[in-house]
Image: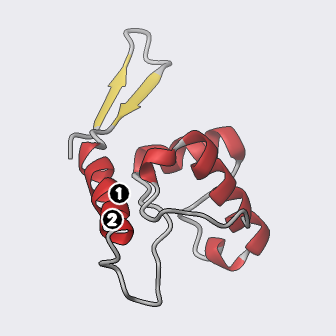
Amino acid sequence: MDNKIKTNQDGRTIQVAQDVSGYLDFAKQSRELQARGGDASHYRSFAIIPDIVALEILTKHGLNLHEAEFMTNKEDVAKLKRIIKSEYPSLLTSNVSRARG
């Protein structure tokens, strides 16, 4: 993983970067496994979310995915699912077919 923090010369702007290629590969492999029927578990992962994307979601949508109680708030989880489906579909780890969330 290649995390980088860069500042410009005046020290006011911070740019954060992360290599997410491993996350994208994992998500694709997970979707392909599910499509072949290879994932027989009753638990289904929805998405894999790199820290850089979690920060962007926090900045753009006000959802703090690292908050301890985040997953207990059904409205926020539904909002996150809509965001991932519309803005980051390559991070989906399952072939989501239901319109819910």
Tell me if residue 91 comes above or below residue 74 in the rendering.
above
Q: In the rendering, which numbered label is found on residue 30?
A: 2
What's the residue type where badge 2 is placed?
Answer: Ser
* Quadrant assignment, res 101: bottom right
Measured in 3D between alpha carbons, the distance from the residue under mark 1 to the one under mark 2, in whole angstroms, is 5 Å
Crowding at dot 1, Cα within 10 Å, few <14 / some 14-19 / many 20+, comes out as many
Tell me if residue 87 comes above or below residue 40 in the rendering.
above
Tell me the residue that label 1 is attached to.
27
Question: Does dot 2 land on a helix, a strand or a loop?
Answer: helix
What's the residue type where badge 1 is placed?
Answer: Ala
* Quadrant assignment, res 96: bottom right
Question: Does dot 1 land on a helix, a strand or a loop?
Answer: helix
Depth check, front residue: 87 or 41: 41
Left or right? Give the position of 27 relative to 83: left
Left or right? Give the position of 74 relative to 51: right
Which residue is depicted at the point 37% across and 61% down?
A: 31
Q: Position of residue 63 (x, y in %)?
A: 67, 54
User: Are the residues tagged 1 and 2 within 8 Å (C-beta)?
Assistant: yes
Depth check, front residue: 31 or 13: 31
Depth check, front residue: 92 or 1: 92
| Outermost residue toward the left in this view | 1
| Outermost residue toward the bottom in this view | 42
Q: Position of residue 60 (x, y in %)?
A: 66, 38
Q: Position of residue 15 (x, y in %)?
A: 42, 26
The number of numbered discs placed on residues in the rendered structure image is 2
| Outermost residue toward the right in this view | 75
Left or right? Give the position of 87 relative to 27: right
Tell me if residue 71 comes above or below residue 28 in the rendering.
below
